[in-house]
Image (cartoon, rainbow, N blue to C red):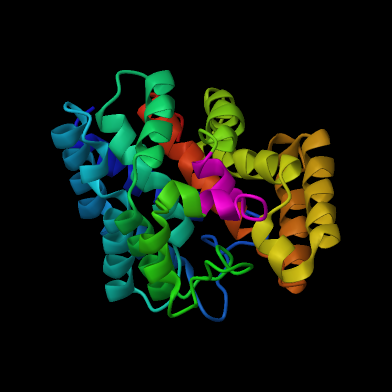
Amino acid sequence: MEPDYIAKAAQIASVLEVSGHPKPGNVHRTQDFDDMVFEDFLISGVVIGDIMRQTAERALKYGETENFHKIGLGRQIKDAVIETNRWVANNTNLGIIMLLTPICAAAAMSTDLKDMRENVDRLMRATTPEDAVNLYDAISIADAGGMGERDELDVGSSKAKDELIEKGLNMYDVLEISAGWDRLAYELTNKMPVTFDVGYPTFREVRSHNTLNDATVQTFLTILSRYPDTLIERKYGKKVAGDVSNGAKELLDAGGILADDGPEQVRAFDEMMVSKHLNPGTTADLTASSIMVSILGGSLGDNH
């Protein structure tokens, strides 16, 4: 695939994800938060385009000779976070960047989605300790917690980056450490199962007969119903995260956004989530990656 096309797919996926409404607990086109607003996410989705294109170009350059380590996924993630930070004041898209960057690289090297999925895994495993250091920098710049907060490889530790080099731990290794409590880390070290096995098929199927908005919201609800959101879990515990997933499942059992009263029911769930400050941010990130894979797979369609 051409780097320009891949970059635009990343931008479109980012914009469609945040535009989906009512997407329970998230910022969306009819709902802002006190510290971040809808337009922040639109801007973030646009400004990463150049870095995503560059990532695809680097994958084309180094993928042919299988010098995957030279692509510099960690540096590309860091650069995308730096660029976002130039335009918006808050961490709007670290998780999205972490997911979409390896997808961009893999897409440039692949002929179909099956090949792309395998290449994501190959690229992640071929990362270097320098990639891991750059990832830690990106997390620090974005001021995001979660990954690496529980053991000796704490992103907040002044010695953490030196330890990565000393121990020879690459980006795959440090994410694998976090995979037990961070869904994005698990996703990136296990061939992206939520994106390829749940999110993408859901978006593709719903989109074939419904609007982009309905496909986005239904995909979000489907992911949330099956995988308790780890951002909510870190803030409020497993029980709360599980209750939220059960609520999403009840909505889906009744048809979700596609039911006759679906928009009203989803809106009520959204209002409840916001009132309790329950933000399924990880689910939103996985929705974005699912939409991007759908675009690359030709599932955007024309039923706006």
Observer-nearest of 248 and 184: 184
**183 is within the stretch colored magenta:** yes
154 vs 180: above or below: below
Q: How many labels does the image show?
A: 0
At horizontal 21% and vertical 31% (from top left) the residue drawn is 63
201 left or right of 257?
Answer: left
120 left or right of 267?
Answer: left
Displayed quadrant of residue 45: bottom left
Outermost residue toward the left in this view: 61
- Using the rendered image of the protein, determine whether residue 20 is visible from the camera's viewpoint: no
- The N terminus lies in which quarter of the figure? top left
Displayed quadrant of residue 133: bottom left
- The C terminus lies in which quarter of the figure? top left
At horizontal 38% and vertical 57% (from top left) the residue drawn is 132
Residue 130 image point, x, y percent: 30, 58
> Which region is colored magenta?
175-189
300 vs 36: above or below: above
At horizontal 84% and vertical 47% (from top left) the residue drawn is 246
Residue 26 image point, x, y percent: 60, 61
104 left or right of 259?
Answer: left
Main secondary structure type of the part rendered in magenta: helix
276 vs 67: above or below: below
Residue 208 image point, x, y percent: 52, 23
At horizontal 59% and vertical 66% (from top left) the residue drawn is 146
**230 is within the stretch colored magenta:** no
Residue 119 image point, x, y percent: 37, 29
- Using the rendered image of the protein, determine whether residue 134 is visible from the camera's viewpoint: yes
